[in-house]
Image (cartoon, grey):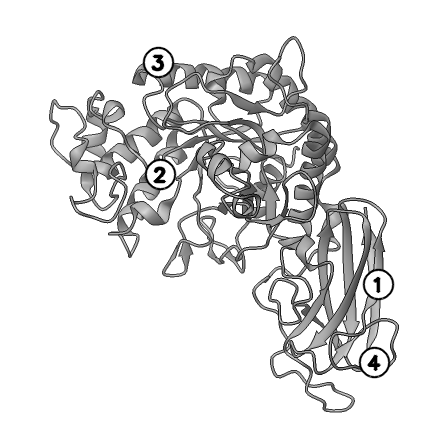
Amino acid sequence: MSEGCFDGSMPRKVLEYYLSHAATAQWIYMSDTLDDDIRVMLKAGIKFLGRASGIWKGEMPEEEHFERSRAAAEKIHAADPEIILQACIFEALYREDVECVKVPRFVFEAFDLPYEDRFFDYDACLFPKGSDTWECMPDISRPETQMWFYYRGVRYIDCGYEAFHMGQIHLYTALDRNYKCIGRVIGMLRQYGREHARRHKVLFDAHSHSLVVNGKSLLDYNAMPLTRYPVTDREGEKIVLVREGKSGGGISPEGVYEKALPFLYEYDNWGGKDNWAHENLTYEQRAWAQWWGYDQIAWFASRDEEYRNTFLDYTFKWTAVNNPDAYFAFPLRRPLHSGEEVGGFPFYKLNNKSENCPGGFSQEDTAARLLNGGYEKYRRFANPSDILDFGAKDVDDPATGVRLPEKVVLYGSFQPYVGATANDSNSEITRMYYVGDGKYSLSFIMPFAGEYDFGISTWGTLSACVCKNRGFPYSGDGHKSRFTVPDDNTIVKITFEYMTNAIEIEMCK
């Protein structure tokens, strides 16, 4: 039986099977290279297609949208019936998409309302006038918005979609602080899915680290775009990734308590290249303007082919090491311009460039190698699951009774390449985890080969530091050890034993 087999219930192990084979396939129902896209899915073993359908603004008439969504789902499932397709219900609504749709009878029935022969009311979906929100942002506390969300969810389930991305959920729930309204809609869609979905189960994620009410998570897993730190001393507008928060825990929709729910990272899109930033900002200013003056996927697509492949490799390893509950959705298909533009904008495509996909960016071989190889090779170097708890609170050495330091920081010239300030002995980014037996450890990815120095500051100060080539602690910044990274994207794990000052360095390519 396949690891991806489920019907009505999805244990965490099965959910992680899908997330560990995930890709973002935004609007793939519109793809003009769908046959080649499917070939790439099968080659890379992709099992979860994020953002496969959805609307942002006026892409096409309503019924055409759902018919094309259904046809794409049927074609993909004919190639691999195991694949989960995700639809989107976003934090933005536009009049041209809402007011042309009649409210179906089934929506009134679901909300125990008398039937009315009418269209959806766009204005009744929005926040009150004068609210400090986008003009187009729906307010989920309003019954009309709940009906709209439910309507679209049902239509996607009927088209064969088994997952939903709910966008920036903390924005449109601003007046729903107990999450009662969004919880109601998600609960209704879950119930509809139990009866009508392909395998009687639908999944929900959103841009959130936690959405828990009374100990229960409304989401099956949390999802966020990646966070960056610009590197200004290397050519080519380089970026390194930075750990930001953790995935919250709670009782999962399966009824199981999880200390941390699974997490899914992605390269997000929101506006493509920022021409104003490129024309008006200095090099140093633009380094901090989003991703060097691009959104995430446009920055990625603007690199040369070799570096795109290198950065995919780096992202995969970074995810495996920095958050052992997390997975990375490879960018199979992602728009390179703003969603405000209606149709005709270019897409990044993972596909190798060919006659069948002349717009391919040629990362499919790298993605296939990484996805088929899996996360486990790198997970053994991973930092602890609870990435915000560094441990060592009121811990004493059992042999001597000496209180162990709660804060131990790895610092040196390597820090900018993991998203911290060079030689910052008080950094939280390179703070080491207490792993027991008097030992502290930290794993990180070095994106560039070379020689780097490091020291270890106990208690986060320079008054009692340790390095590998000195047998005694020292004060100040004058002594450091060195380590050599033989290849780009090498995993480095450094372990430090407080009572003996022993330091161990491990590496993995």
Which circle, 2 or 4, is nearer the viewer? 4
Q: Nearer the viewer, residue 133 or 277?
A: 277
What is the distance, in whole Å, between disc 1 and disc 3 at their CAs? 61 Å
Circle 1 is placed at which residue position?
Answer: 482
Residue 64 numbered tag: 3
User: In the current view of this chain or complex, which residue is farthest to the bottom?
Assistant: 401
Mark 4 or 1, nearer chain start:
1
What is the distance, in whole Å, between disc 4 and disc 1 at their CAs? 19 Å
In this rendering, would 376 be left or right of 52?
right
Residue plotted at (32% across, 29% down): 152
Q: Dot 2: few (<14), some (14–19), or many (≥20) neighbours within 10 Å? A: some
Name the element at disc 3: helix
Tell me the amino acid under the disc marked 1. Arg
Mark 2 or 1, nearer chain start:
2
What is the distance, in whole Å, between disc 2 and disc 1 at their CAs? 58 Å
Q: Nearer the viewer, residue 154 or 69?
A: 69
Q: Marks 1 and 2: in contact by CB < 8 Å?
A: no
